Amino acid sequence: MEEKYVVKKPPKSPGLAGVLSFFFPFGTGQLYNGQPQKALIFFLIFAGLVTLQTTGEGQPFLGLCLGAFYIYQIIEAVQTAKRINMKSLSGEGYEEEAYADEVPELVKSGSIFWGAFLMIVGLVLLLANFEVIRYSTVFDLWPLIIIIIGIKLVAEYLSQKGESNNSVGRS
């Protein structure tokens, strides 16, 4: 009797992930790998870097950043596909959900912060569209967004740390 060997096909092709990222450098390789949140972040980074090229300011640094990001996203897509294949072939099984945790969840349910934040950003952009404020002012103050998000993350960490210390003290 003949023995039949079944060759297990890897779930993701590193070559295809690399080719997709090479020709469509805005998160398609990450989307192929089952990482929609990471693909969205890569799209926003790529779109932002391309948009900044049109102003002509910050050159050649921004051009180098765009080139470095382009190369990085190709390498990242290929390496992630290889990691998915290694997990699958090692017997742990491939689950697309397992890789969703690599990028932190941007919108947490039960948090009012993100809703309020998006409403404020939308209001500022609306005011700029109606020329109540100038876009140059908005773009000059964009680092405030990073500061506000950082303050929120630190406050959440400290509140969680305080809750865990209180629960340990009561036990």
Image: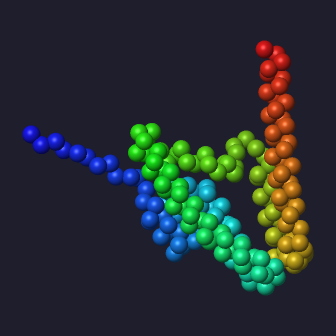
Picture quadrant of residue 72: bottom right
Viewer-nearest residue: 92 or 109: 92
The answer to whether residue 11 of the structure is visible from this angle is yes
Which residue reaches farthest top?
171
Viewer-nearest residue: 52 or 12: 12
The image position of residue 112, as x and y in percent, is 78, 46
The answer to whether residue 27 of the structure is visible from this angle is no
Q: Is 101 located above or below residue 146 in the figure?
A: above
Question: What quarter of the picture does the N terminus occupy?
Answer: top left
Which residue reaches farthest left?
1
Picture quadrant of residue 12: bottom left
Viewer-nearest residue: 116 or 78: 78
The image position of residue 10, as x and y in percent, is 39, 52
Q: Is residue 136 rendered to the left or right of residue 107?
A: right
Q: Residue at x 67, y 71 (%)?
A: 68
Q: Is residue 71 rendered to the left or right of residue 45?
A: left
Picture quadrant of residue 41: bottom right
Q: Residue at x 64, y 51 (%)?
A: 103
Q: Residue at x 82, y 53 (%)?
A: 149
The number of numbered badges drawn on the structure is 0
How is the model colour-coded?
rainbow
The image position of residue 18, as x and y in percent, is 50, 67
The image position of residue 102, as x and y in percent, is 62, 48
Q: Residue at x 86, y 54 (%)?
A: 148
Q: Is residue 66 rendered to the left or right of residue 97?
A: right
Question: What quarter of the picture does the C terminus occupy?
Answer: top right
Viewer-nearest residue: 119 or 66: 66
Q: Is 36 located above or below residue 157 in the figure?
A: below
